[in-house]
Image (cartoon, helix red, strand yellow):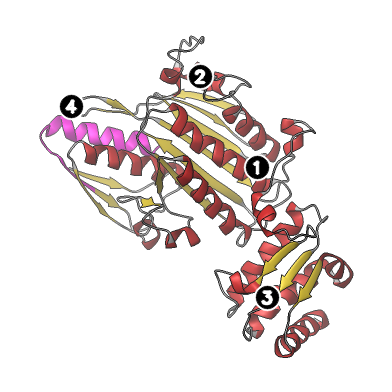
Amino acid sequence: MDIEFNTFGKNLLEYFVKQFNGNKKKNPNDNYIKLVMANDFFSAPEAIAPLAGIIDYLKALGYKVYVKYGSNVLRSSGLNAPFLVDKNQYELLSPMYKVWRYNSPEEVFQIVSALVAFLNHKVECAPGVLQAFEWTVNEVMDNVIQHSQSEYGYVVCTATSGAHISVAIYDNGIGIMKSFKNSKYRFRSATDAIMAAMQEKTTSDPEKGQGNGLWGMSKLIKNNKGSLSILSSSASVMIDKYNNIEKKDRSVTLKTDTPFTIGTLVDFQFQCNNAVSIQDVFGVDYDFTNLTLEALEDESNRIHIKIKDFSFGYATRQAGSSARIMAINYVTQSNMKQQIIIDFEGVGIVASSFADEYLGKLVQHFGFVVFNNLFKIINIGKENMAIVNRSIMQRNSQ
């Protein structure tokens, strides 16, 4: 069967299910699926994450799936062969716009750490955004392991600097409503189950969790004026940036030999420019440990950045941009309370474009006085000192 995709987004699942079921009714023995993507087809996370999971499910049933790609972004996304942590370590350096399949806490940690590291040097974010992102992704990915009874989870993340970070997490599991089967809760509909799961201390199993995951996620996203959508067991709940709630039934049951209702999809966006107060959500006594900054702290509680360890190098303007955004994010995340050491030890001659984009623009961003209070450059040789000084002076003269 051929299934053509000309659009993408929140209705893609219904479209795929309708096309699959229609073809299956006409040709019940057809186990070959060809997915044809339009040339301008771009996959949003909420489309590609569940589609990758469903492809995996159909392959396990014996279906042959072929994808004709319409764009290089989609071709390299792992749609038809999701990325695996143990086999794709190099890809963790650039984890965005990729489908990651996971089934263990260790894999969750590595994927989330890679996403946070990438965002730290690519997307400038307001206070609390990256911390809220990290907390939320960890919680939702862990929910898949703890409650879904699915063999795997699937996660996709995209980001637009100055706009938003989008994440979709999907599983082929039993759905939120069925996960409460052996609990004290009784719901009349799948929609009621989704709404209840977003309430504080609502959990299907107190031994596995305290019921703070989806509740905390919804509160953080509301605090940020982001958006959230949860699809599970043929129902969905969508909350927009104005906190408007839309509930609807969804036709998402594949008519395979054993009918399969698509599992759970959690899709959310954080706005990069809207600060998030984690204390407002969890209370003033909540202590969020920023593992990224903690790993960089020296014995004097300073954030120690070693240029030689930059995965993106120090030879291009793009590398300088990544270094500058990372430095700004570290200042934001530390609430301007920790000095940042920029260490040139072991660094060869840096490119002038790197020095300008990194330090020239960094001084321009903060101003000389604030920069000198926040940053300290150490172990820099005469040649690099001359390059950096020239970049700063030229940038300042503009």
Location of the N terminus (image quadrant)? top left
What numbered label is drawn on residue 205?
2
Q: Residue tagged by mark 1?
A: 132
Q: Label 4: how many residues lie within 10 Å, few (<14), some (14-19) or many (20+)?
A: few
Coordinates of residue 62 in the picture (x, y in percent): 17, 39
Q: Residue at x 58, y 79 (%)?
A: 316
> Is residue 10 something that shows in the picture?
no
**Disc 4 from disc 3: Cα separation:** 58 Å
Q: Write the residue at 30% across / 50% down.
A: 80
Q: Amino acid at mark 3?
A: Glu
- For badge 1, the amino acid type reads Ala
- Tag 2: residue type? Asp
Which residue is denoted by mark 4 in the rendering?
257
Is residue 12 located in the magenta-colored stretch of the structure? Answer: yes
In the rendering, which numbered label is found on residue 357?
Answer: 3
* Residue numbers of the magenta segment: 11-34
* Secondary structure found at label 4: loop
Please determine whether, in this image, residue 175 is positioned above or below residue 183. Answer: below
Asked if residue 200 is among those painted magenta in the image, a careful observer would answer no
Q: Earlier along the polypeptide chain: callout 3 or callout 2?
A: 2
